[in-house]
Image (cartoon, rainbow, N blue to C red):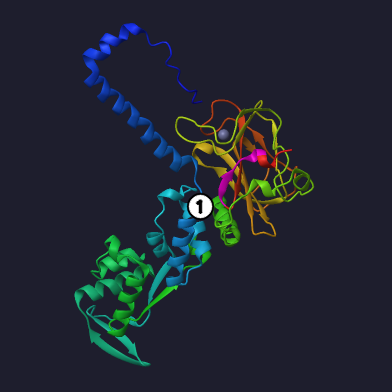
Amino acid sequence: MADPLTITSVAGASVSIIQKYWKQLLIFFFVISLIPVFIITAAMNLLLPQISKEEFGVYKDLTKESGINWASLMAYDTVRLDNYLKENNPDESIFDFLKVNFKEYEITQTEKQVIKTVKGKEVTETITQKEYETIRELEIHGYLPIKELLNSLNYDTSKDNMNVKKVTDFLSELNDKEEYEIKTLILTVDEITENFDENHRKWYCALAEILPLLDPTAEFDPDKFIIPELSANPSIPSIWPAQGIVTSEFGENRITHTHSGIDIANTEGTPVYATADGTVIAVGSSGNFGRRIMIYHGTDKDGTTYVTIYAHLSQFKVDVGDKITQGTLIALMGNTGYSTGPHLHYEIRVNGTPVNPRYFLP
Ligand SMILES: [Zn+2]
């Protein structure tokens, strides 16, 4: 789609124009040269969602402080942002996993007093209006999202203050003052995925299971892969996913991005097959990919994880969670998402990073 421009036909007659307007031309070309930078930045975010080593590090460190499973948190962000991980903010997402329980207060008829249980004994205390409102809120809703709760306690919820340690320190400080009995709990899977639709819910559960197997520090080395071994191994993507003509190779420079897969063009409805044994982890629409399927093919003895993506499909033939074998019909070719004609965008991710599918094709 991004054919290099050839500028061999600029005539000598334009030289005088350049001399006359060189300043304006300079500004014009400078502005023009900025446009692709903006487009590339936007498109890289949109089209090449992948997990970087740094992101793994951030998720793992954060969850150590809170006791939340890092894979659950990362799966949550992946699904919530539809794989648009460059926009993530794990610092904030982590609070979506926590719920706060206030248990020891009970509101009395007078509405300005609470009955507080201290060491098993009931004590009636007068409380401030602010405390009353907080307790009232909690009684109505069971729990509040932490940010709202902290706001109601006049906690400074600026970005700097919203790290897990500062918040949990603040809450335990309130506990020490015996003003509140606060328990911070981690939400259940049902509560976490409450706002997901059925497909996204399944995707979340599948990701939470497989993410611990991803090791972004394991670099993919194509030299390690020998074709006869590949073709004898149905657990590694090693067959063509569809018949057709290859219209775009991996790594090709487009105006907006570098191509992260291989495009195979054929008529709409051409069968698309799983390229290895595996489990379907995502079925649905995803931005420029249109209708796409993701399959997890397991992790080999070296700890290398394989996921394949099939995009721009017209029809799905499998569901999330289905166990499939190499060669299973999974979908029909289509023209959904950002696509200029019926084709399959086929992508292989090794440890989360797109690699050239040609390494794996017979
Ligand atoms: Zn493509």
Chain part drawn in magenta: 352-358
x 26%, y 23%: residue: 26
Q: Is residue 260 magenta?
A: no
81 vs 188, nearest the viewer: 81
Q: Is residue 105 above or below residue 77?
A: below
Which residue is farthest left?
128
Instruction: Estimate the x, y position of residue 184 in percent, counting from the top left.
Output: 40, 74
Tag 1: residue type?
A: Ile
Q: Which residue was labeled with disc 1? A: 51
Relative image position of residue 170 (x, y in whole percent)? 30, 75
Residue 273 in sight: yes
Q: Which is more toward the observer, 359 or 260?
A: 359
Residue 297 or residue 355, whichever sits in front = 355
Q: Which of the two residues, 181 or 83, is positioned nearer the viewer here?
A: 83
**Residue 237 left/right relative to 143:** right
- Residue found at x 24% / y 75%: 131
Work out which quarter of the rendered image holds the C terminus and state it.
top right
User: Does residue 66 lie above or below 37 as drawn?
Assistant: below
SS at circle 1: loop
Please provide percent x and percent y for residue 18: 27, 14
Residue at 24% x, 18% y: name it.
22
